[in-house]
Image (spheres, helix red, strand yellow):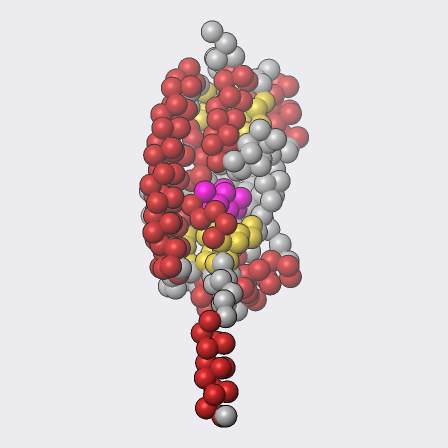
Amino acid sequence: MLRYLSHTIFYLIVLLPLPSAAALRVFACEPEWAALVGELAGDKVKVDTATRPSQDPHYVQARPSLISKVRRADLLVCTGAGLEAGWLPLLLRKGNNKRILAGHPGHLMIADTVQLKEKPVELDRSEGDVHAAGNPHLQTDPRNMLPAAAAIVDRLAQLDPDNATAYRENLAMFSDRWQEAVLEWQLMAIPLQGMPVVVYHRSWVYLQYWLGLKEVASLEPKPGIPPGSRYLADVLSRTQELPGLVIIHSQYQESKAIEWFSGKTGAPVVLLPSTVGGTPEAKDLFSWYENIISRLLKASGRGDD
Ligand SMILES: [Zn+2]
């Protein structure tokens, strides 16, 4: 009888359908990485995002709701290069989740996969410069999405080997579509080459490099430091006579200095989405870059012919 029962239990255990393996949980620091993970993993993962498009990723509060998301994450995907230096270390400490700490497969900083611009010889935050480790706004060059995507898929495959083939297939498809899109954007943006721009924060150096825009000044004297009147007067005197000047800021950089500067120079102000969701048109990774270029063409009047 006992033997019969144990057999029954054995078969019950073996034959009952097992719940499918729980989906990986990804914690993305910025919406663009959440979107990229979405392109590569679809519904095989659940993604939490630390920042909304309306938030400046330099300054985020380590809220309790974020800590609980960090606690259950299998993979952390952040920009790195100091962008999250003001809040991520605290979140990781409070989340106390070894899987996503530095040195573990669940810890991925995209800055480690691309060529960083303005990397200093020596780290110096003494004047409050939030780019002391190099310029972290690398997502504004879409070509950086390819090494980022490859790194994400490597980690997904490592953490979830059952779906590794699917992740790699998605990567191949994404890379093809992406390379085609990048070429189209480059064609669209030809009229923008050499266009002089004044930025509020130095968030666009990768975009400028990609499209050949010419940054002539930033309204912040140093990244993260609001401008004073003497500094602004100096920028004005250097740029006042520049023909075709355009002022660029992103959705979370509202500043009186922008209005003042535009009033003095007559230069148009253009809001560029710094991430997916930064403008209503930037619905996904593809429409995001397209919208950046469309907005620049419209503001500059260079796309009218
Ligand atoms: Zn910055």
Measured as percent of width and height from the top left, residue 246 is found at 52, 20
* SS majority, magenta: helix
At 44% from the left edge and 48% from the top edge, which residue is drawn?
Answer: 41
Left or right position of 169 against 36: left
Q: Is residue 125 above or below residue 95?
A: above
Outermost residue toward the bottom in this view: 2
Give the image quarter of residue 228: top right
Q: Nearer the viewer, residue 224 or 237?
A: 224
At 39% from the left edge and 55% from the top edge, which residue is drawn?
Answer: 163
Give the image quarter of residue 149: top left
Q: Nearer the viewer, residue 256 or 112?
A: 112
Q: Which residues are magenta?
A: 30-39
- How many numbered circles are shown? 0
36 within the magenta span: yes
Measured as percent of width and height from the top left, residue 248 is found at 54, 27
Left or right position of 142 against 296: left
Measured as percent of width and height from the top left, residue 32 is found at 50, 42
Left or right position of 199 against 210: right
At 36% from the left edge and 38% from the top edge, which residue is drawn?
Answer: 173
The answer to whether any part of residue 200 appears in the image is: no
Q: Nearer the viewer, residue 289 or 265?
A: 289
At 50% from the left edge and 70% from the top edge, which residue is drawn?
Answer: 16
Measured as percent of width and height from the top left, residue 255 is found at 64, 33
67 within the magenta span: no
The answer to whether any part of residue 261 appears in the image is: yes
Q: Is residue 221 above or below residue 271?
A: below
